[in-house]
Amino acid sequence: MLRPALLLLVLLYSVLALARFAGLWLDGGAQQTFNLYALLLEVLSAALAWWALRGVSR
């Protein structure tokens, strides 16, 4: 029951981070620090969910 929820979190945060990165790339907005912090948060959240998913799978 926990595995599908973690898989959904990994997928959701990965897609959000990819979309935010694409938006930054299209805008050329390296000066938008709030987007960079949000990107970092989403990547970190996806990594933590992936780590938890690997722990549950064992």
Image (tube, helix red, strand yellow):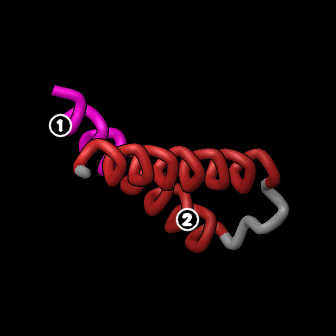
- Residue in view at x 53 percent, y 56 percent: 20
**Image mark for residue 21:** 2
Q: Position of residue 55 (x, y in %)?
A: 36, 48
Disc 1 marks which residue? 4
Q: Is residue 4 left or right of residue 20?
A: left
- Residue in view at x 18 percent, y 37 percent: 4
Q: Secondary structure at mark 2?
A: helix
Residue 22 magenta-drawn? Answer: no
Q: Earlier in the sequence, mark 2 or mark 1?
A: 1
Q: Position of residue 41 (x, y in %)?
A: 64, 46
**Magenta stretch, residue numbers:** 1-11
**Image mark for residue 18:** none
Residue at the extreme front of the image, as rendered: 58
Name the amino acid type tagged 2.
Phe
The residue closer to the viewer here, 47 or 16, is 47
Cα separation, mark 2 vs mark 1, equals 26 Å
